Every structure is written in C-alpha cells, then in structure tokens.
Amino acid sequence: MSYDFIAKDVIMLHPVYAWMGWICVLSPYETTFESLKTYIREYYKYAKETFGKRRLRCMLISNCS
C-alpha cells in the first residue's frame, strides 16, 4: 500500500511506528483534529491505566519507587 506523506489532512499509518498501531496526520484541519480528540482521550486514558497497573505490579513484587 502506498502513502502520500506530503498530503495534508489525511489520516494514515505512521511511516515508522505503524507496527505499534500509530497513525499520523500532517497538518490536520480543525474538523479532522476535532474528530481525533475522542481517540486521543481514549488512548491517553488507556495508557495511564496500563502504566498504573505496571507500576502497581512492580511495587508489589520488588518495592519499586
């Protein structure tokens, strides 16, 4: 699949981090950015929960700080 990495306001897989599920948008228009805010909030919350679980596990196992 080919991508146009100079196209503006196009949601596409990140050229380097696609394997981790990342996407990218070059110069998103306001409507595109607004539509992505829900996903940004959702995945930020997921990342915080995941980090919290890892930290708790670390603290329980080896008393990490």
Image (cartoon, rainbow, N blue to C red):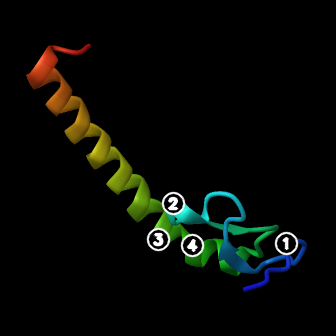
Query: Disc 2 marks which residue?
Result: 20
Q: Position of residue 61 (x, y in %)?
A: 11, 23
Q: Is residue 60 above or below residue 16?
A: above
Looking at marks 2 and 1 on the same chain, the residue that comes earlier in the sequence is marked by 1
Observer-side mark, 1 or 4, equals 1
Q: Quadrant of the N terminus?
A: bottom right
Query: Disc 1 marks which residue?
Result: 5
Residue at the far right in the pictured view: 6
Looking at marks 3 and 2 on the same chain, the residue that comes earlier in the sequence is marked by 2
Amino acid carrying label 4: it is Leu
Where disc 4 sits, the SS reads helix
Observer-side mark, 3 or 2, equals 2
Q: How far apart are the alpha carbons under marks 3 and 4?
A: 5 Å
Q: Residue drawn 68% across and 80% down?
A: 31
Marks 3/4 in contact by CB < 8 Å: the verdict is: yes
Query: Disc 4 marks which residue?
Result: 36
Amino acid carrying label 1: it is Phe
Looking at marks 4 and 2 on the same chain, the residue that comes earlier in the sequence is marked by 2
Q: Position of residue 19 (x, y in %)?
A: 55, 64
Where disc 1 sits, the SS reads loop
Where disc 2 sits, the SS reads helix
Q: How far apart are the alpha carbons under marks 3 and 2?
A: 19 Å
